[in-house]
Image (tube, helix red, strand yellow):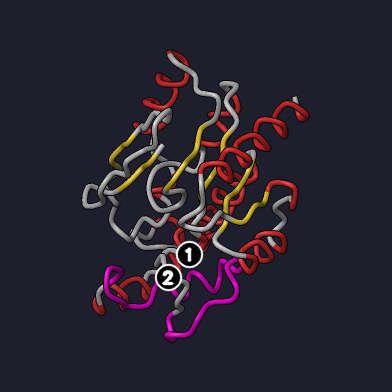
Amino acid sequence: MHVRSPMQAAPVPPEGVRLLALESPLPPFSNITARLGDLATERVLSRELRSDPPDILHLHGFGNTGSTSIPWLAGRLGVPSLVSLDFAEAFCHRGDLIDYEGRSCERVDEPARCLQCCLSSFPGGLSPLQSRMAKALRGLGGLSPYPNLVSCMNRLDLVLGGLGAASLLILENAAVLQRLSELGIAARSLRISPAVDADAAQWLELYASCLEGSASIS
């Protein structure tokens, strides 16, 4: 399952893999949790899994587009899930882990820090005028049309909850594995992604371990 914005190209799946390619338009930045809950995507997935359930659901685009509930929903319908995770897309509202001061962000579990970053002006986010208005309206909390502390807390909870429901998480490198462990994700569900030129056997081994882990849990 590849949930993408309309500008992204759909991948070409290998033989024997069914591709469910869905478009999920990116919402305005002012609602930083909007892209984490996509009812239309969830409905399509439910229909697909009920009519023709696959052995495994492999999800791409988690936290960037689509819904963080997809791994949970797949599990409720009896299908184990793998998530190919881009850490920055999942945990950073900007998608690049660069904070409001232009530095690399090392703390994704501090909603107050994320809020400060959300209310700053940057390309693709709030304009300078919107940033000033957002900071002026910060005292309104959830009544403000701009990001607030509760929305930042909810975003983190939704991401962690969705990842915790997946059978396996496929990660870029060992550094990301360490960061997810520190965030409370069980080490047994974490795997490093095979290299770009990896042969099919390595992916089959991952899929097999996903099925075995799902069977042992059930």
Among all residues in the image, which is located at the extreme right?
216
**Callout 2 secondary element:** loop
Q: Amino acid at mark 1?
A: Ala
Q: Mark 2, residues whose alpha carbon is within 10 Å: few (<14), some, or many (≥20)?
A: some
Mark sitting earlier along the chain (1/2): 1
How many angstroms separate mark 1 from mark 2 (CA)? 5 Å
Reading the image, the residue beneath label 1 is: 88
Left or right of 16 on screen, residue 113: right
Q: Residue at x 42, y 70 (%)?
A: 96
Q: From what the image shows, is residue 73 above or below residue 131?
A: above
Q: Main secondary structure of the magenta part?
A: loop
**Callout 1 secondary element:** helix
| Number of numbered discs overlaid on the protein picture | 2
- Magenta-tinted stretch: 100-126
Reading the image, the residue beneath label 2 is: 96
Is residue 118 covered in magenta? Answer: yes
Q: Residue at x 55, y 43 (%)?
A: 203
